[in-house]
Structure formats: C-alpha cells, structure tokens
Image: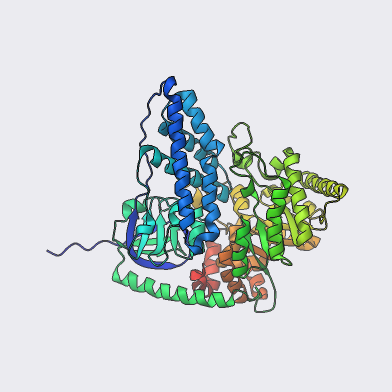
Amino acid sequence: MPAKKATEIKLTGINASPGICIGKAYLVDTEGVEVVEKYHVDGKNLATEIKRFKAAVEKAKEELRSIIRKTPEELRQHAYILETHMVLLKDKMLYGSTIDTIKNEQVNAEWALKKVASHVRSMFQAISDDYLRERASDIMQVADRIMRNLIGAKGIDISAIDKRVILVAHDLSPADTSQIHLERVMGFVTNLGGKASHTGIIARTLEIPAVLGLVKATRMIKNDDVIIVDGTTGIVIINPTEQTLVAYEERRVGYDEYKALIARSGHLPAETADGFRLQAMGNIELPEEIFAVINYGGEGVGLYRTEFQYLSRPFFPGEDELYDKYKDVVEVMAPRPVTIRTLDINGDKALANATGSDEANPALGLRAIRYCLQKPDVFKTQLRAILRAAAHGNVRVMFPLISSVDEVRQTIQMLDESADSLAKEGVSFNRDIEVGIMIEVPAAVIMADDLAQIVDFFSIGTNDLIQYSLAIDRGNRQVAHLYHPLHPAIIRMIKHVADVAKDKGIKVFMCGEMAGDPAYIPILLGLGMDELSMNPQSIPAVKGMIRSLKLKDAKLFVKDVLKQATATDIEKMVQKTYGSVLSDMIYSG
C-alpha cells in the first residue's frame, strides 16, 4: 500500500527578512527550560546557592566570549549584539534581582531566575515601541543561557550542522544566529520574534529569508519536511504540492532577478516619471546601521532612534558618550541630513537606573516628551550632545509624542537653554538646526495649524498615529486585525497634516512603517509627502515605485481615495489601479 501523501499546510507569520528559499527543515531544540522545581534553601546555604548562580553566569559569559571570537566575518558588524547580551548577564534587573530573590525568599537559583526573568519580560512587553518591546526576547535568551548552565543542560551548536537546511526553532538568540554558515543555512523560521528582534536584524544582514512569530512552527514542522519560506510575505508552506513548488521556484528566480536589478538601481533618485523628487531616507537605531542606509541608496537618516544608549545600564549615559555616538553618524552622513529623535521611552519601565511605580497603561503614560520634560537634567544632557554633534554636519532634531503647543514651547526653551549653557562654556556647537515634531496622536493632527507656526517640519509617525486614532493595540492578537493604515480616518488625517504643512510653508515627512510599503506610495505621493523614511532594506523598492509613478496621476487618484468610506474599498482601488506595478514590486522587500 503506497504511503499517504503529506498534506500541504500554509502558515502565516511575520515577514522579518525578504526572499524565498525552498529546502528541508532542520529542527533546533531551543524550547528553553519550561519546568523548574522550586525548593526552600536554608539560611546557612544561601551563600552557596548564590555562588552557584554566579558560577552559571560566569560560564555564560565565557560561552558568549567564545562565540564572539568565532563569529564569521560577515556577522562581525553585529558583534555588539552579543556584547549587549554579556552586559545583560550582569544587569541589575536580572542579575541583581535574582540574587535578591534567592536571599529574600530563600529559594533555589533556578526558581529565582525564572521569576525575575518573567517579571522583566512583562515590563518590556508592556512597552508600545516595537524596538524596545522586542528587547524582552533578549532578556529571556540571556536568562535561558544561565538556566541551562544551572541545570547542566547542553546548548545548541548550529555551527555543527553539516548539510544545507532551513532552520526551524522556537526562538534563535543572537548567539545562535551568529553561528550560522551561509553555505549550509538557507533561511529560518521561529515561533517567537519579530521584525525588530535581533534575530530579524541579523537575518536581514545576512540577506537570507526569515519568517518569525509563527507560534506553532516547531509543532507543525517535522525534521526533513520540505518547506517553502517566503520572507517577503511572511508565508511558510509545509509539504508543498508539485504545483506550489513550481510556482514558488518561479517566484524565487524572479525575486533574485529583481534583487539584482534593485542593487543596480538603488542609488537612482526617487523621482517620479513627471519630474517630482522625494527624499527616501533610512530609519536607524544604532550608529552601525548608517552603512545599510547608504548601501541601499538612502539619502539621509529620517529617524535616528536614541533609546538604545539608555537601556540596560546602571546610570544615564553622559553627554560626551551621547555626543560621540551622534557625531559618528552625522560625520559619516554629511552633508546628508540626520534626524535625531530625542528620547522616546516608556517612563521608568525601560530604564534600569530609574525607580517608580508600574503604570497601568504605559502607552498613555509617562513616556517620550512627557518623560523628558519631567527630567530636565536628563533631557538637557541629550540636547547638548545633539547641538554639539550638529557642528559636524546636517542635523535635525525631532520631538516625539507631542500633543500640545505648550509642550513644544517648553521643549524649544530647553533647547535654547542648552545652547546658552554651551555658549557660556565655550563649547563648539550649532544651534542653527531644523526643529520638528512627530505627529503621532490625534491632538497633534487637530492642532497642526498652531504647531506649524513654531516648528520647521512635521514627521508623521504612522505606527502610533494609527494605534491612538483607532484605539487599537496592534500587539494584541485579539484586535490586531483592526489595525489598518488605509483606514479612511488615517488617510484623512494625513491629508489634513500635509495640507496644513503646505499652507504654513513647512515640510512634511513620514517615518512610520507605512512609508516603507510600496503599496502605499501612490497615496502618500498624492497626499503631498516631501520625504519618506523607512528601514534601509525597503529603500530601493520604494524608490523604484516612486520612479514608476506620475505625481499628477497620484494626486487624481487620492481625490477618489478620499471619497471612500472603508479600508477595504481603498485597498481594492489600490489593487485595481496599481496592481500590475505592485506585482512586480512584491518581492522587492
């Protein structure tokens, strides 16, 4: 009796790194240690228990040092991620709190570590910013490494894989991915992780397809199953039929050809067929990412997130340290602009050195400009560093989560006071920089005409604007499907902001995820954006899309879009009018 043919199964996850690969699955056991026994430790044995925990941490540090030494050349630029994990090993949130828990609750190290790690993960997951929220996975990966050492479990060794495969894992830590050899690993899929996770960042660096956040991948996929990983659309197909295999093989070839074309055309200007020129910029979190912006044809940095320097450390960073970080980016980018967004952090929650009560709703709490205005010393330290860096190139400063004119006035006053203090000290700086605000809340949209009179530019942050306008937490799986950039309310808000900016003679930019999707470009062009900023890998496709359009057509198209009452209707219009162009763009990343 012939064996029953396997059924084709399609899974949808997060499109973390574009491209298509087809091959056999290789399951990696990274489930971590879920079951931990709790037991009492007598007072006389507490010192021994703490010593045992410290030894497990030291062993973890040695393991990471060894991995850093053996990291392949193509991943050396991301060695800082592993070094971040080494810092987290001794972070007070994890290391200090675990020791305190062992002492105070008189429990074994495994239980104390699991309790503390779960608490820290919950804190990070409550943060609305995608990048910061993804740091929860770093905490858990570090905790898991210590835990394995405590219980004597063996770690995984991806470098030992001796055949060409697609990795399937519950999660992959930066240490795991740093062991990948491109000649043997075609791509990977994981249950956990997102675009902003370090796993996603490394996948894009290696330029191999990756689909993350599949939840049940390790349960659905078996070793040696043939799978298709489409990192562009976030689709994984298990046991594909012959017909599906042929179709995806054609797409894979098409993607490779398109990628080669993009590589050749990435540095062409983002200019429409009728001569209108937009600026296509890159979003970065770390100074090292500016090279990706340049390599993908970015014309500057439209959003430099500055939170990273504040996380997981016992003290706030000093002015000189911040200045050095900003100066590095500004000098390399000069004369192209670098838009530095001031600290956008969720109150005390993400700062290791701060204290304060937990907020019930951090997305609406003490975050971003609200936090900075309550911490003038911290804020002015950053402003001074930005003004000093501005002496080395083309800097713009941008303030997040603005909701009132008063906030902007207070902020500009602090910027002026920071400049005055530098002048008195005889320190070199440049106060002649453009000052902008992010449009992220409905209040800023409504007050745009007043706000436009006191700033040089608006930058629309669509991620938060959509979340706050539609009252949807896109991290909540129950309602995430309601999060839609093409909701008519969002389109009309963007129209209002753009119209006000034109009327008042200031520039209007966009730096949310909407700016990096070719499908939205006809609408954004027609609405009047002057500049779009996105993750660097999206720049070539967006520039290509812009070059395929005419401004006059996009303006006419938007007139019809604004008459629609539902996101579905607008989607259909986009597909009907630009579907043929988008089908060529879909595998652009």
Q: Position of residue 214 (x, y in %)?
A: 41, 53
Q: Position of residue 379 (x, y in %)?
A: 73, 44
Query: In the image, is 184 to the left or to the right of 477?
Result: left
Q: Position of residue 342 (x, y in %)?
A: 70, 50
- Residue 399 visible in the displayed image: no
Q: From the image, which quarter does the N terminus lie in?
A: bottom left
Residue 470, compared with residue 91, is above or below; it is below
Q: Position of residue 370 (x, y in %)?
A: 70, 41
Q: Looking at the image, which is closer to me, 313 or 256?
A: 313
Q: Residue at x 48, y 25 (%)?
A: 103
Q: Residue at x 63, y 33 (%)?
A: 355
- Residue 551 visible in the displayed image: yes
Q: Looking at the image, which is closer to me, 203 or 581?
A: 203
Query: In the image, is 244 to the left or to the right of 474?
Result: left
Query: In the image, is 301 to the left or to the right of 28?
Result: right
Image color mode: rainbow
Q: In which image quadrant can residue 410 be found?
A: top right
Query: In the image, is 108 to the left or to the right of 457?
Result: left
Residue 130, compared with residue 2, is above or below; it is above
Q: Residue at x 63, y 57 (%)?
A: 287
Residue located farthest toward the top when viewing the structure as drawn:
43
Q: In which image quadrant can residue 552 be found?
A: bottom right
Residue 250, compared with residue 380, is above or below; it is below
Q: How many marks?
A: 0
Residue 207, compared with residue 343, is above or below; it is below
